[in-house]
Image (cartoon, rainbow, N blue to C red):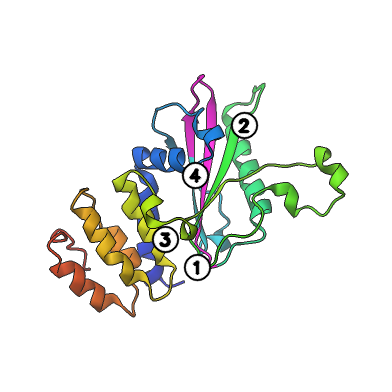
Amino acid sequence: MTDEIAQPRDRFLKELLSHPERAGVLLREHLPDEVARFLSAKPPEAVPSSFVDEQLKEHRSDRLFKMETIDGRTAFLYVLIEHKSTPDGQIGLQLLRYMAEILREWEKSNPNWKRLPAIIPFVVYHGAKPWKIPNEFRRFIDAEEAWGPYLLNFRFPVVDLGGIPGSRLSEDLGLYVWLLAMKYATKEKRQMEVRELLTQALRIVSEDLRPIVAYLVQPNNRREYHEHVDTHPCCPQLTWRS
């Protein structure tokens, strides 16, 4: 992956998850209700660590958040963003490794622990093809069905942005423009379709779209996109050319 492609994407994802309030909205809106309703109203706290293997960073990004539950417990929400055009059939084992590493890091600061903190893995997928693989670890294990109660198991919620209508991506307009960009970014020859939706959103919400535009613009359609955003009445602040 060239720096020309990697840098806009990395800036985009860093900005997307760097705001605690925005990350909190993403988690509360897209986590299952049985998880989200037990989270306190406090914004999540980002933990400055990445657990993705170096050779896989071209295809995924991650961010770990520490959150408080409504009864005062500490829980970790591990957000993994998949960039591959198709779902990765080995993601269950990879998530297990990441979660084990999170617990190892936590144990260094809590050597006298009596109970482990909860870790909820959460996958955000925006590939070109629909997500059709299991989101339960046990489904990846070749074993007798009767052995189920004795096998390691966990579920990981998956949000497939491609399968969500644009109008339902988020009720928060600030988060909406970011998820809209992700939804279209991997759709070949469709990035231009999002331009009007983004500029319409600008009329309502003040959001710095420079990392979003840079992320969406590909070498083949860059000039057309530049001309559109530079002349659109809602986008005079986008002085993002290098």
The answer to which quarter of the image holds residue 211 is bottom left
Residue in the picture at 16% in, 68% down: 230
- The percent coordinates of residue 114 (x first, y second) are 67, 21
The answer to which quarter of the image holds residue 2 is bottom left
Which residue has dot 3 on it?
183
Instruction: Answer whether labels 4 and 3 touch (C-beta < 8 Å).
Output: no
Name the N-terminal-most of marks 3 and 2: 2
Distance from Cα at disc 4 to Cα at disc 1 = 28 Å
Give residue 49's mark.
4
Q: Is residue 83 magenta?
A: yes
Which residue has dot 1 on it?
128
Inspect the image, locate mark 3, and give the three-letter code of the amino acid beneath it.
Answer: Lys
Which residue has dot 2 on it?
107
* Classed neighbour count for the residue bearing mark 3: other residues with Cα under 10 Å, few (<14), some (14–19), many (≥20): many
Q: Nearer the viewer, residue 33 or 228?
A: 33
- Region rendered in magenta: 65-85
Distance from Cα at disc 1 to Cα at disc 2 = 38 Å
